[in-house]
Image: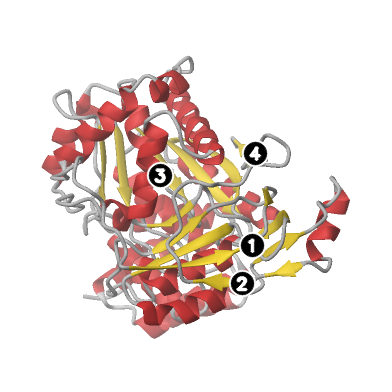
Amino acid sequence: MTEAFDAVDVIARKRDGGRLSDAQIAWVIDAYTRGVVADEQMAALAMAIYLRGMEKEEIARWTQAMIDSGERMDFSGLGKPTADKHSTGGVGDKITLPLAPLVAVFGVAVPQLSGRGLGHTGGTLDKLESIPGWRAALSNEEIFDLLGQDGPGAVICAAGSGLAPADRKLYALRDITGTVSCIPLIASSIMSKKIAEGTGSLVLDVKVGSGAFMKELDKARELARVMVELGNGAGVKTTALLTDMSTPLGYTVGNALEVRESVEVLAGGGPADVVELTVALAREMCDAAGLPDADVEAALKDGRAMDKWRQMIAAQGGDVDAPLPVAKHQEVVYAPASGVLTQLDALAVGVSAWRLGAGRARKEDAVQAGAGIELHAKQGQYVQAGQPLLTLHTDTPERLERALAALEGGWRVEETAPTCGAGAAAAAGAAGVEAGVVGRAAATAGGRAAETTGGHASVILEKITA
């Protein structure tokens, strides 16, 4: 077979700042999928894209080429609207668990194809696999049945190998070649899978802050806009919310720990920040599906969302009444003084939970279902000296030393609350009482600190529609 282009010529064109033609992009993605373009050649092209960037038309064509490398699902035969959500990943980000059944209450099919955790960010599938019997691997036929009139209407499962196989190869390559943080490649990676998934509408939760992939608001905004344009350009109604990930979501970080907290939300309770984001995303998804007046808060409070959750979990083999796994060992970090918890850094907590066994360093690593961190206070809350701040959970106590080391400098209690506005940022960097008081006692689930203001700071920063 004679190839239409030469990989070296394509690499050189982008290296020199040129625009790749539609034909070049289509060829290089197809040739890489077939093995004609070698990994080292695609690595060079990825680096050229990282350094030189891509025009909007190039990103759109690159995304389409990755979609074309595999199958595309079609839910048009369901007889109901479809809506999905994608999060760029964070710490304590359990939102998919209560969100999918909540949206399904209103007759919207939710095909939530999710992933596993890697590094400090947790994976939705890892969380759900802490439920005895639950399975992530479903055939396309099973997905359609679960989304249909006789199913729960929502499914959370692993993406099949047929969706955007080119992206799977390129994602692994970017991870080892220093080209992960490239907006054209991030956007095309996410959107190729979501468009191929076949959903009619999509809401993006783009995290920003220390625990997110995007640390800066401007970069997060740019990524969101590119993805929204890609989705709408492909016929998928797409919007995005920029949300704060400077501190963990909720009071738990881990797998079974986050499932437990998600069930609290579905029971009409749960942490204010988790409820706020769940409700906001549910409203966006329902609105995109043509149901702008859906009362999602009522569905959380009256038990309809919980009923859907139980149906959804049971339909995938899960025992909704079985006890969740509990880690064998706990270690508690106590407040060394009374004051305000002025810092609780998402990245520090996420890395610590990862080191406890809640996450993985390589995709083939196993995770501990019960491992993670339970927070007893949130950033901005007042705590008493000697009060538990965090409880670390793990099956392997030899992990505790490194997990505690990850928390050093990641939290701070100040005896005087910082002033509002610009003074708060200055106070966060001022001298305070740092982490260092650690005990070896089991923490109780209760005893959470009271917030100093009687409310919580909104996690939603802004909305991107075009």
Which quadrant is the C terminus positioned in?
top right
Residue shown at 36% from the left, 71% from the top:
357
Q: Earlier in the sequence, mark 3 or mark 1?
A: 3
**Residue at the spot of label 2:** 437
Which is more toward the observer, 126 or 23?
A: 126
* Mark 2 vs 1: CB contact within 8 A: yes
Q: Is residue 281 left or right of residue 155?
A: right
Residue 41 in the image, given as x and y percentages of width and height: 41, 82
Disc 4 and disc 2 in contact, CB within 8 angstroms: no
CA gap between label 3 and label 4 equals 19 Å
Which residue is tagged 3?
A: 261
Say which of marks 1 and 4 sits in front: 1
Q: Earlier in the sequence, mark 4 or mark 2?
A: 2
C-alpha span from label 2 to label 1: 7 Å
Where is residue 293 drawn, in percent x and y?
48, 14
Q: CA distance from mark 3 to mark 1?
A: 23 Å
Q: Nearer the viewer, mark 3 or mark 4?
A: 3
Q: Which residue is mark 4?
A: 458
- The residue furthest top is 293
Q: Which label sits in the foreground, 2 or 3?
A: 2
Q: Is residue 245 left or right of residue 149?
A: right
Whether residue 19 is visible here, answered yes or no, is no
Mark 3 vs 4, N-terminal side: 3
> Type of residue at label 2?
Val
Q: Mark 1 packing: few (<14 Cα in 10 Å), some, or many (20+)? A: many
- The picture quadrant where one finds residue 38 is bottom left
Mark with earlier residue (2, 1): 1
In this view, 56 is above or below 451 = below
- Residue position marked by numbered label 1 in the rendering: 335
Q: Is residue 179 above or below residue 187?
A: below
**Amino acid found under the numbered disc labelled 3:** Glu
